[in-house]
Amino acid sequence: MSNPTETAFLKLVNQHKGILYKASRIYADSVEDREDLQQEILIQLWKSYQNFKGNSEFSTWMYRVAINTAITYLKKEKKRSNNHTDAPAHFEVQQEDYNPTKDRQLEIFYNAVQELNSLEKAVIFYFMEGMSHKEIGNNLGLSEGNARVKLNRTKEKIQHIIKKSGYEF
Amino acid sequence: MNFDQLKEQWNKEDSDVHIPDTIEQLKESKHPIEKIQKSMKKEFPAQVISIILIGFFPMLFQFPPSQYTIYYISYALLVVVSCYYLFGFYQFYKQADLYTGNTRNSLWKIYHELKLNMERYQSFGFLLLPHFIITLGLVAYNLLEKKGESLADISHQHQISLILLVLIGVLSVVASIILWTKYFYGPSAKQLENILNEMDE
């Protein structure tokens, strides 16, 4: 039998489960890894929830815990290129991810994001969630200017990866 | 395609996530920092019992009462530093707000905790060494005394061998402690350091 705190917590998480889903899509490229990461984020959310005072919006707090947990999950990182020109010549939309009802463009984007480092993933995640440079900077602990520079670089990198993979951008 | 189109699709995408009905249904964490905290929890009782047992060595090895003072001065030092170490690791274990700050602060906090724990483990290990050397010295002294001999009766060659043996033993233990902490904490600390460096670029 769950207690009231647990019920309230699970209700809030359910309302904002999009954060959980999208953070795991950005940080993990297989279904299994995604499920593992979603579990980890839920565990850390629950552990931290005892200290959540409600000074900020639940969603703001959830964004931070989700991204910080994803960044520190520190699974052995895949060897990825630091240089745009080293991006894979072409990637196929993975079979397990392919769902004809979903838009193919988004799948291509998710695949390209897997080539980014963990900080770039956080930057693009916040951008896709519609945050301003200031909000991205606040969440990451960067100045607004630095957040802008990092976002522009990350967007360029994604564009380059997608183009290199044979798709138009 | 462009980012505006992607954002539009991103916002429309279904959130295919299973949220459990109760917290109990969550699986055990595989998070590396959580794993470190859990292994610390497992080590805790063994460390406390070991420290208590070390306190009974004089009785176990039948030290003469005259040597108790020497032994327990060294032991008291060991207990004080162990308490500091165990308290530090308990605080790290209890920390529940490692992930709630902004990313830079959060990563720094975890990074410093890992580094601090590396140092704590090392200082704990290094502190055990002089205490065990004192204990071994007293055991050796008492064994020789029972035979009616003293350290001065050992041949010069044996004395040098003994010193070398202690030196090699100490160096091996120090190296093992450093390598073990680097193996245990090093990879996580290194990855965090790299991310923090990326933030400053």
Image (tube, rainbow, N blue to C red):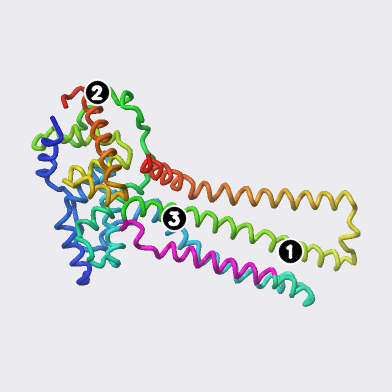
Left or right of residue A119: residue B177: right
Which amino acid, mark 1?
Answer: Ile
Q: Which residue is drawn at 59% across and 58% down?
A: B123
Residue identifier under label 2: A164
Between marks 2 and 3 in the image, the one whose residue lies nearer the viewer: 2
Asked which secondary structure carries label 3, the reply is helix
Q: Which chain is mark 1 on?
A: B
Residue identifier under label 3: B36
Determine crowd level at label 1: few under 14, some 14-19, many 20+ residues with C-alpha closer than 10 A.
some
Q: Which chain is mark 2 on?
A: A
Question: Same chain for marks 3 and 1?
Answer: yes
Residue identifier under label 1: B134
Residue A148 location, x and y as percent? 25, 40
C-alpha gap between disc 2 and disc 3: 40 Å
Question: Same chain for marks 2 and 1?
Answer: no
Residue A18 location, x and y as percent? 16, 50
Left or right of residue B152: residue A100: left
Which amino acid, mark 3?
Answer: Ile
Tag 2 near tag 1, CB within 8 Å: no
What segment is highlighted magenta in the picture? B74-101
Asked which secondary structure carries label 2, the reply is helix
Q: In the rendered picture of this protein, how many numbered marks are placed on residues?
A: 3
